Amino acid sequence: MTTLVQAVDLIKVYGREPNLVKALDGVSMHINEGQFVAIVGSSGSGKSTLLHMLGGLDRPTSGQVIVGGKSLFEMNDDELTVFRRRNIGFVFQQYNLVPILNVYDNIVLPIELDGNAIDRAYVEHIVKTLGLAMKLNNLPSHLSGGQQQRVAIARALATKPSIILADEPTGNLDSRTSQEVIGLLKVTSRQFNQTIVMITHSEEIAQLADTVIRIGDGKIVGGKTS
């Protein structure tokens, strides 16, 4: 299998002695194309910091992340912003939808920001797969939490990224809706050939992934990494 994401000896340190905090302490891992990986850990374990590093949202104190053969932290901020927009989709716990835009405009917003033509047939396919076809004119405030998360997933898929990073995507959802959303993520990842890395504190949700990686005190403490 082809390695899509590689983290090499990631270290992230906050503060100064004697109040030094090591959020990541030498994390190395490989993620292959098409994998659905769950990263599990308690609050403060370093899982969110790791996800932010994998997505280039934060820079490590040392170490590197390589996505699709590109070293993220050798890019300047502008180059990294463009690379993220074109190659990495994000799904957050808080949905991060634009409240004044309807569902369709929220979905295609990243494409328009990049100045690209919208592949309408592809977007229509995503919308149909996620059960949003009847909601395209709705504002986010007129949707349930589960529906808003579906819109966030559709937005992440619409730019055709090679990888989707999901930060506690079911954190605000009830158990049944959570299972439904993760099921949809699995379906769409296979259907649209995307790699997914999801962080969660829920063991039940994590077990729905192909691979589970456990992190504690800034280190990988269990699970396969490649």
Image (tube, rainbow, N blue to C red):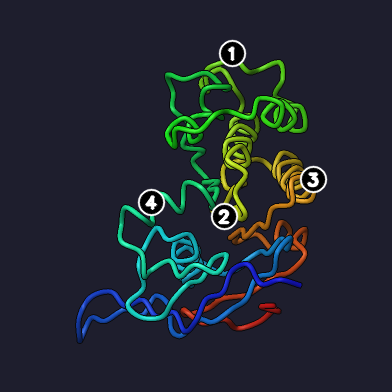
Q: Amino acid at mark 2?
A: Leu
Q: Amino acid at mark 3?
A: Gln
Whole-number angstrom distance, CA of label 4 to CA of label 3: 27 Å
Q: Amino acid at mark 1?
A: Asn
Q: Is residue 104 above or below residue 193?
A: above
In the picture provided, is 222 more to the left or to the right than 76? right
Q: Quadrant of the rendered structure where residue 204 is? A: bottom right
Q: Quadrant of the rendered structure where residue 53 is? A: bottom left
**Residue at image point 54% right, 29% down:** 117
Residue 165: give its label.
2
N-term-proximal mark, 3 vs 1: 1
Query: Between 194 and 217, which is closer to the camera in this rendering?
Result: 194
Whole-number angstrom distance, CA of label 2 to CA of label 4: 15 Å
Whole-number angstrom distance, CA of label 3 to CA of label 1: 25 Å
Residue 111, percent from left and from top: 51, 34
Residue 186, percent from left and from top: 76, 50
Front of the two marks 1 and 4: 4
Residue 144, percent from left and from top: 61, 26
Task: Give the class, few, some or many, for how many residues have Cα within 10 Å of label 2's Cα (few <14, many ≥20).
Answer: many
- Assess whether mark 1 and mark 3 are in contact (beta carbons under 8 angstroms): no
Whole-number angstrom distance, CA of label 1 to CA of label 4: 29 Å
**Residue at image point 69% right, 77% down:** 226
